[in-house]
Image: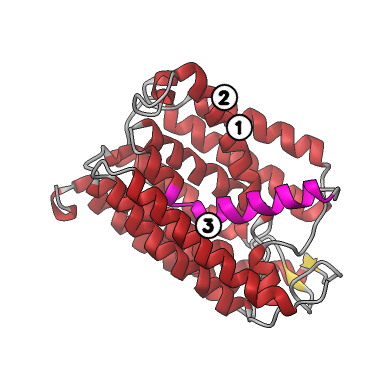
């Protein structure tokens, strides 16, 4: 079925096109408020910016995306209570994360709420926990803890990776478009993935203000609920049988965040503390601009999208080997650029 023959995806495309200008407009208005209230991110030794910059721009992004997602689910959603539980989890994380942007809440409280929202989201998945057999790949009893831990990790890594101008906007745009395309090419029911193109559109509008040099930062109020919603959509893809595609689409973020965390843990560092050791951060410290690194990641995501689409044909080994090769070139290139960076 082509896009023009799919009324649900046509509706979502319209909502996504609405999201981009609305997000840009809302972010511009919010910047004035953040500056007036001096809600600024001051640079420090671990920062990748040099001037105080408004933070909390995610509030505008989600204020646009969440109502449009709700509208899309009302008009073309799967029905039932499931989507609204996922949306409620995203709203809860948005509120908590914006408070964290304002007051720096404790990590324990934030992590507890994330766990509760992920548990709520898993209970709300289509067809219940049986889908956690990942399309018949594994037992649901194995899939459930994997999905739970993977989703919690994805929420946090999406936050960890938001360290330079444009990077999370680029990743959200890539994932939103990728999930939508896999859904169309794979012939899946599009009702559950309504948020994907809408989030892509909202990210595109935000990039107008967040591109280097950024006039506003996303903050936890953007990265945390975005990670939560995108994580939910990737799990739905996996649950419908497209496990390989669900792993390939976010592969750059997964690899950079996980490898960096493991290296820091093995080095005896306090992994919960801010740092500048991600591959993309090493490249900016080595002399590349934020814009150039973000474009490099966009360039990495393009072949990953192609490999994810290839996997919808049933291929497994080829797409996975291709993903390893793409990541080796991308991460290796960033590491090479970062060799000249100060320690």
Is 343 placed above or below 318 here?
Answer: below
Residue interval drawn in magenta: 248-267
Q: CA distance from mark 1 to mark 2?
A: 6 Å
Q: Residues within 10 Å of mark 2 (few under 14, many from 20)?
A: few
Instruction: Please tell me whether mark 2 sits on a helix, a strand or a loop.
Output: helix
The quadrant in which residue 333 appears is bottom right
The stretch drawn in magenta includes residue 76: no
The answer to whether marks 1 and 2 mark residues whose Cβ atoms lie closer than 8 Å is yes
Instruction: Please tell me whether mark 1 sits on a helix, a strand or a loop.
Output: helix
Dot 3 corresponds to which residue? 252
Instruction: Please tell me whether mark 3 sits on a helix, a strand or a loop.
Output: helix
Identify which residue, 340 or 7, lies in the foreground. Answer: 340
Q: Is residue 143 left or right of residue 135?
A: right
Q: Residues within 10 Å of mark 1 (few under 14, many from 20)?
A: few
The answer to whether marks 1 and 3 mark residues whose Cβ atoms lie closer than 8 Å is no
Dot 2 corresponds to which residue? 145
Dot 1 corresponds to which residue? 149
Q: Upstream in the sequence, badge 2 or badge 3?
A: 2
The quadrant in which residue 27 appears is bottom right
Q: CA distance from mark 2 to mark 3?
A: 23 Å
Image quarter (top left, top right, bottom left or bottom right) of the C terminus: bottom right
Q: Percent from the top left, x then y, of residue 255?
A: 58, 53
Q: Residues within 10 Å of mark 3 (few under 14, many from 20)?
A: many
Residue at 71% x, 64% y is 55
Residue at 39% x, 24% y is 131
Magenta residues, dominant SS class: helix
Identify which residue, 278 or 166, lies in the foreground. Answer: 278
Residue at 54% x, 58% y is 61
Is 267 placed above or below 128 here?
Answer: below
């Amino acid at each position: 079925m082509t896009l023009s023959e799919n009324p649900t995806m046509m509706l979502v495309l319209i909502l996504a096109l609405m999201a981009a200008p609305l997000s840009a407009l809302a972010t511009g208005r919010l910047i004035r408020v953040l500056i007036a209230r001096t809600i600024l991110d001051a640079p420090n030794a671990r920062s990748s910016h040099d001037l105080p910059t408004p933070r909390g721009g995610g509030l505008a992004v989600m204020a646009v995306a969440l109502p449009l997602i709700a509208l899309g689910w009302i008009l073309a959603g799967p029905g039932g209570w499931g989507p609204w539980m996922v949306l409620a989890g995203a709203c809860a994380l948005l509120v908590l994360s914006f408070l964290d942007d304002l007051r720096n809440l404790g990590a324990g409280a934030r992590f507890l709420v994330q766990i509760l929202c992920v548990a709520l989201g898993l209970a709300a998945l289509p067809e219940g926990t049986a889908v956690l057999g990942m399309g018949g790949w594994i037992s649901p009893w194995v899939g459930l803890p994997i999905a739970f831990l993977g989703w919690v990790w994805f929420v946090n890594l999406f936050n960890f990776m938001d360290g330079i101008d444009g990077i999370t906007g680029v990743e959200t745009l890539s994932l939103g478009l990728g999930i939508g395309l896999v859904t169309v090419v794979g012939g899946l029911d599009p009702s559950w993935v309504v948020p994907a193109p809408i989030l892509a559109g909202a990210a595109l509008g935000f990039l107008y203000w967040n591109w280097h040099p950024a006039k506003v930062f996303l903050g936890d109020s953007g990265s945390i609920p975005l990670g939560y919603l995108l994580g939910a959509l990737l799990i739905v893809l996996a649950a419908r049988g497209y496990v390989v595609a669900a792993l390939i689409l976010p592969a750059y973020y997964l690899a950079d965040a996980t490898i960096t965390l493991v290296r820091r843990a093995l080095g005896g560092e306090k992994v919960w503390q801010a740092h500048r050791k991600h591959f993309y951060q090493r490249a900016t410290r080595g002399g590349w601009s934020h814009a150039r690194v973000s474009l490099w990641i966009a360039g990495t995501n393009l072949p990953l999208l192609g490999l994810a689409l290839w996997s919808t044909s049933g291929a497994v080994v080829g797409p996975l080997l291709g993903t390893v090769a793409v990541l080796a070139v991308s991460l290796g290139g960033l590491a090479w650029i970062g060799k000249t960076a100060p320690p």
